[in-house]
Amino acid sequence: VDFSLGADDASRTRAVGPRSSVPRASARRASAVPPPENEDEGTTTEKIATNASPPPPPPPTVTASDMMRALGTSPRRIVLSLGGATAVALGANFLGSTSALLGVLPPEAVESSGLDAYYPVNGFKRFSSSEFGYSFAVPNGWAADTAVELAKATRRAARLDYEMPRRNRPAGGGVIPDAAFGPPGKFDSRGVTSNTDTNVSAVTAPATPGFRLASLGGPTEAAETLLRVSLAPEGSGRKATLLGAAEVQAGKARAYRFEYDVDRGEKGVPLRALSNVAVREGDVLITMTVVAPREGWEGEGGKRLRKVAESFRITR
């Protein structure tokens, strides 16, 4: 067998050999050179950013107007509701709001408004008599004396019963206060309550035309006359001692104010009282008195009783 190569075969071998060996070396050199680092990272980031979904839109902004429209209301309705609620709270004295508000106002302004007749102010509520034109403060919690109201009703009924024979009419000729207040007491057999040891009362009496306060003399002279004639007359078993007297301004009129003790002996504990005497428009004599056991005038209780006496006013 002839294994020799011909010229043509050798030339073909040489031609093929170099062509196949060159690509292999180039491939090895290409694999040995790493790709640029920055280019690969940039390409990867760009691909990720291209394939990621878009960010969600921001939530819508809800305004106060949008919320009010959703609730079916408006700023005007809210203002009216707040104003109405405030008026109701003040009118009902909710949590003492009205009393607290009136407590910071000047006392003269509160008295002139008349609101202290409906709302307690600093622990006091004002009583006013539209018939006789006077007023005074009453401690909050004190009640009207029902015995006085019953006696006044009985006297009014007797005056209206013109057909009743005079001998059958109730006596009722004593002095009945126009108004009286005191701490709540116990009910008696008639269903009325009366606390005579601690109370404030006002007595009215018609005066002769042209009567003036000076007609009684000075404050001391008038006080001594009252004690001797009305409070501790001879044979009554009571002894009255005047402690002081002065003339003061009481609203729209002058008044005499005097303080005194009354010793009742065995009939009861000693009492102390403060009285105001004034003449309204020259036709009505008004006497307002605060009375309590002597020891009741000490400390805070005494301050409160004196404030009641000093609150007396003539209103017309």
Image (cartoon, grey):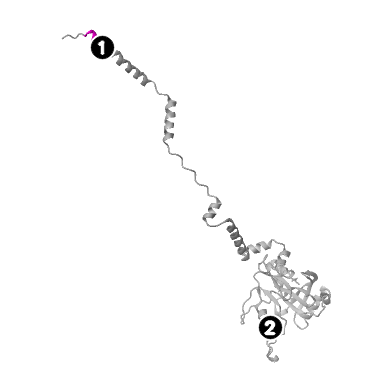
Q: Position of residue 263 (x, y in %)?
A: 74, 77
Residue closer to the observer: 227 or 252? 252
Residue placed furthest toward the front: 8
Q: Residue at x 23, y 7 (%)?
A: 7
Q: Quadrant of residue 83?
A: bottom right
The residue segment tinted magenta is 5-11
Kindly indicate the quadrant of the structure image that contains residue 31.
top left
| Label 2 SS | helix
Tell me what residue is drawn at x 79 percent, y 69 percent: 248
Does residue 231 appear anywhere in the picture? Answer: no
Magenta-span inclusion, residue 10: yes
Say which residue label 2 marks. Answer: 156
Q: Nearer the viewer, residue 32 or 213?
A: 32
> Measured along the vertical axis of the image, is residue 148 above or below residue 137?
below
- Give the amino acid at mark 2: Arg
Q: Is residue 218 visible?
A: yes
Q: Is residue 127 part of the magenta span, yes or no? A: no
